[in-house]
Amino acid sequence: MKSIFYIALKELQDGLRNRWLLAISLLFVMLAAGIAWFGAAAAGQVGFSSISSTIASLASLATFIIPLIALLLAYDAIVGEDEGGTLLLLLTYPLGKRQLLLGKFVGQGLILALATLIGFGGAALAIGLLVPDIDKLQLFVAFGRFIASAILLGWVFIAMAYVLSSRAREKSSAAGMALGIWFLFVLVFDLALLALLVLSKGQLNPDWLPWLLLLNPADIFRQLNLSGLDGSLQLSGVMSLGQDLAGASGTLWAALLGWMVLCLVLAQRSFIRRPI
Amino acid sequence: MKLVELHSVRHCYGKLQALHDLTLSLNEGEVLGLFGHNGAGKTTTMKLILGLLRASAGQVSVFGASPQQAKVRQQLGYLPENVSFYPQLTGLETLRYFARLKSAPSVQVEALLEQVGLAQACKRKVKTYSKGMRQRLGLAQALLGKPRLLLLDEPTVGLDPIATRELYAMIQQLREGGTAVILCSHVLAGVEAFIDRAAIMASGCLQAEGTLSELRSQVGLPSLIRVNGLLQASHWQAQLNSEGFQARLVGQDNLEVATHNGAKQQVLKLLLEQGDAEDIEVRQASMEEIYSHFMTQPFAQRNAP
């Protein structure tokens, strides 16, 4: 238990030292504020439009950016220590591989969680203070859900990064795999799902189509945030599939959490099998 | 009690068999030198003792238990070959981190930095350290928590002669304190004085094992007696050779006599009683000579009766 704490502490200190925390927080606050005030610029409007449209745009953007940041933060967690020569040393210490992995997860998970909280929370605070007549409760609920699910999404992809970091022989190949994972879940999955729908010409059972979305944590995250908004927004693409899941936000949260646990278990198994 | 016991241990990396039926043991407070060429299986043996690898066959026990157990690792110290640390941390931060992971008291951190001579540089980042400084930080790391057994893999690589001597002096000090050490190396010069026993490995097999005098008598290498400033050296050479010794003239008045076990005293007595040498020097076969003897002779021939 104590080793997990000290490993997490070191990861957190590393995150502060190399300014990851600062950089991600700043990036998030700029993204959120920019979208809130200039998101409707394309429609000829400048200024805050609405909480729903802000969250909708933010969720679409976060689907791209949070997995990328999580993968970047964590892809070298194991293979990097191995290449650096410190993994060999750590494993001769009285701590198990599971503790090492969990310590890293807690530390890097905290970095991402803090950055998300500071970044998007800061933006929410700015909206609450600067926009007159805002529904504070709606703002709090929408941003609260957005921040919590964004953190969980980040954790899923950190755990995923550990799986490939435990399997990769070299840091560069781990980086390549991370990019592949990002590409698969953020871009390819939706396209493949749409292609499946078109090619099947309606022969697939429409009852279980929405559940396919649960196979992609990025889609679960988007669904969680979009389904919680008022009905005035038109959902497009694969997201419209998920309207049946709208009432099942508990399932969506559980699915996201399940992804995280699954990836952590897989990472641990790969790590234990990793030759030294 | 045996501190470390390896019994008929085999290890395979895939199809490659790295260790063949290795049986080796280490007593409490003993310093064992593990010598062999690159790829002889030294590091594999160390990793088995550290519990980093599991033996494919045979038993490994450390402090009477399986090396995978945390309580065993608590009492082990390891300095890997080419040790490296987190470049962005300072020496002090590095050692503090490892001390916490080993539940070693924090006062030991400063004491160890002092002991290895890094107290001045401990606030500098490790990436600015020279190879020798990193090696000393690695040694300090291995000494955290006062281990009962210390495993040093090529500890002198990259060290200058003075640092090497300091390292050996530190090993000597630890031995006096009751710490057992396994010293793994292919650099042999000057190591004789610091080890109790030596094990020589080649291609995953143990070639020889024992105290230095046991190994010396096993290989039957002669002790060299060098006599300097001897009048009538050539006369002495002829006399010694006629008595069955191997004497060789070096320059005008220096003589080198190769003697085996019993004959050494005989030759010395003769020279001291009748000779008028300025200086007599006796040199026993060094670890290096013993090692190359085992390496150059084919295995089968040596084991033949």
Image (cartoon, coloured by chain):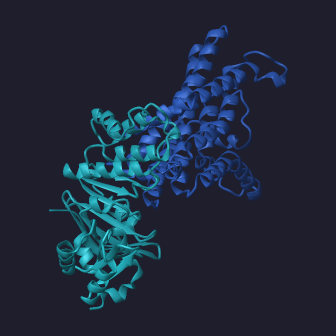
Is residue A263 visible to us here? Answer: yes
Q: Residue furthest top?
A: A132
Which residue is depicted at the point 68% across and 26% down? A31
Which residue is depicted at the point 18% across and 80% down? B262
Chain letter, colour blue in render: A
Is residue A145 visible to us here? Answer: no
Q: x, y (%) of residue A29?
A: 64, 23
Could you tell whether A164 is left or right of B31 in the image?
right
Q: x, y (%) of residue A46?
A: 79, 16
Could you tell whether A140 is left or right of A131 in the image?
left
Q: Is residue A84 above or below residue A26?
A: below
Could you tell whether A184 is left or right of B132 in the image?
right
Could you tell whether B47 is left or right of B24 in the image?
right
Q: Residue furthest bottom?
A: B305
Q: x, y (%) of residue B239?
A: 27, 85
Colour chain B is painted in? cyan
In this view, the residue in front, A216 or A266, is A266
In this view, the residue in front, B140 or A52, is B140
Q: Residue furthest left?
A: B1
On the rendered image, what quadrant is the N terminus of chain A found in? Answer: top left
On the rendered image, what quadrant is the C terminus of chain A found in? Answer: bottom left
Residue A134: image quadrant is: top right
In this view, the residue in front, B111 or A92, is B111
In this view, the residue in front, A221 or B230, is B230
Which residue is depicted at the point 50% across and 37% down? A108
